[in-house]
Amino acid sequence: MINKKVEDICNRQVEREGYSSNLYLAMASWAEVNGLAGVAGWLYVQAEEEKLHMLKFIKYINERGGKAVMPAFKKPPAEFKSVEDLFKEVLKHEEFVTASINEIVALTLAEKDFNTHNFLLWFVFEQVEEEASAKAILDKIRLVGKNNMYQLDRDILSLRTPAAGPAANTQAAQ
Ligand SMILES: [Fe+2]
Ligand SMILES: [Fe+2]
């Protein structure tokens, strides 16, 4: 059985993963209406992954005898200055999520909740990948030049890693 403190912080993460999904949908929509079909495609897939992350937390909380509660989500921004700026936002947001996951990990250790600790390890690995992929795209933007988005937009989907997180744990995302 999950304790109340751990349940609450996991519910906070339900909101954060859900917001991540909405944020990436907002970014995808901006990219799509600005003729960046590749960038939009990358972000739509990313939004789906974040939805799966939210579902993992919902199902875990409920499985452990808690209750996942659907939060209200704040409205994500609708405008972005440039593709470079957008991906800087992605990286900043992923760093925020990493800090958030680390905070939950620390709480599970303090509360000696080793089941939740084990559940969180998938997310610890996942965040390494999430930050690395945002950084890799920012590097590519610098290489092609921030005013030359044609090439990046054409190639960005090939930069996706095939599956999120360590393969052994992906079944939990289904
Ligand atoms: Fe996530
Ligand atoms: Fe993420």
Image (tube, rainbow, N blue to C red):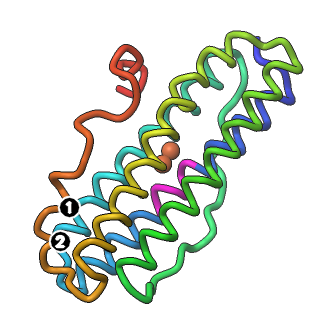
Q: Is residue 154 above or below residue 54?
A: below
Residue carrying label 2: 153
Q: How far apart are the two marked residues, 1 and 2, measured between alpha carbons?
A: 6 Å
- Quarter holding residue 74: bottom right
Neighbor class of circle 2 (other Cα within 10 Å; few <14, some 14-19, many 20+) is: many
Residue 34 located left or right of residue 50: left
The kind of secondary structure element at disc 1 is helix
Which residue is farthest front? Answer: 143
Mark 1 is on which residue type?
Ile
Residue drawn at the location 29% of the way across and 78% of the way down = 31
Residue 65 is covered by the magenta coloring: no
- Quarter holding residue 171: top left
Residue drawn at the location 84% of the way across and 12% of the way down = 112
- x, y (%) of residue 92? 57, 63
Marks 1,2: beta carbons within 8 A: yes
Residue range in magenta is 17-22
Instruction: Say which of 101 and 7 sits in front.
Output: 101
Dominant secondary structure of the residues highlighted in magenta in the image:
helix
Residue carrying label 1: 156
- x, y (%) of residue 166? 39, 23
